[in-house]
Amino acid sequence: MHLKVLYFAQLRERFGLAEEALSVPESVVTVADLIDHLGTRGGVWLETFASGAAFRVAMNQEMVALDATLTDGAEVALFRPVTGG
Amino acid sequence: MTVSSTKTNLDLTAERFSVSVQHEDFDLNTEHSHLVSDDRGIGAVVAFIGMVRDLNLADDVVALELEHYPGMTEKTLANIINEARKRWTLQAARIVHRVGKMHPGDQIVLVLTASPHRGDAYEANMFIMDYLKTEAPFWKKEWTPQGPRWIEARESDDHALTKWKKNDL
């Protein structure tokens, strides 16, 4: 499955990456699986996702829960809770 | 134009309900005039303006930078207005949210709500801001004399949202 993954604000700065095209193995089915998968990169990726800090996920520009099923070609965005207004 | 029911509201032209995410500052009088234009059925307009403060967490703030998720931001703001229209009789509504670098005293966000009677405009305006603060993909970064830092989300904002969700029951 192919995904476009976006990182915003704190996560973008920490990973030094705003966006990437990602090909994930079949074992990656849900948003939570994707996060585990990114954590296997180790270093700052693992630290970030294992830190217990809250973050949010949007799929195709709508907020989704961690158990949401990924769809091929989806745009998945990861970020810390929002602070506008 | 007479506005007597929610049904009529839904028939109003879409341009009475709009959102804008922009770098430029906004002018309250201009936005207000455009919102009410020729609608004589409007009896109340409520305006909320969010400003950049010079003090946060006991540190001087010299600048603020707003980042957002282009595309999702506009969709989310439009959804929030649609949610408000389901709950209150609104004749017009507008959200303007600035992005980029700002300074203490600058305006960040404008929410205008217009209705036949003030109750709807007041409540819808607060609802829109409460939702915006927890749902719309904006992130604030502050510059202090100690350097930049990202603002963390506040629990009180989640509590403000919970109030509306409880009202659904």
Image: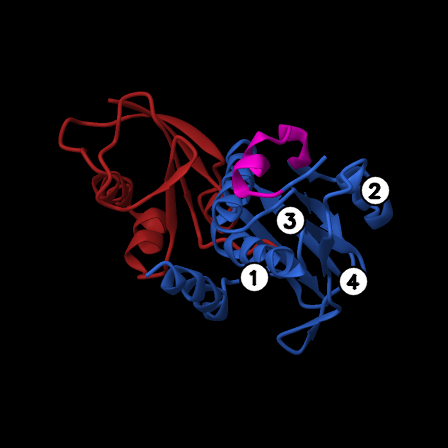
Tag 2 residue:
B33
What residue range appears in magenta? B4-17
Distance between the alpha carbons at the discs numbered 2 and 1: 34 Å
Tag 3 residue:
B66
Badge 4: chain ID: B
Return the x and y of residue B36 as percentages of the image width and height. Answer: 77, 41
Amino acid found under the numbered disc labelled 3: Leu
- On the same chain, marks 4 and 3? The answer is yes
Q: Colour of chain A?
A: red
Dominant secondary structure (helix, strand or loop) of the stretch shown in magenta:
helix
Tag 4 residue:
B104
- First along the sequence among labels 2 and 4: 2
Amino acid found under the numbered disc labelled 2: Ser
- On the same chain, marks 1 and 3? The answer is yes
Mark 3 and mark 4 in contact (Cβ < 8 Å)? no
Return the x and y of residue A34 as percentages of the image width and height. Answer: 25, 38
Residue B24 seen in render: no
Q: Which mark is residue B151?
A: 1
Label 1 neighbour load within 10 Å: few <14, some 14-19, many 20+: some
Q: Colour of chain B?
A: blue
Q: Is residue B123 left or right of residue B50?
A: left
Name the residue rendered at 52%, 37% in the picture. B7
Amino acid found under the numbered disc labelled 1: Ile
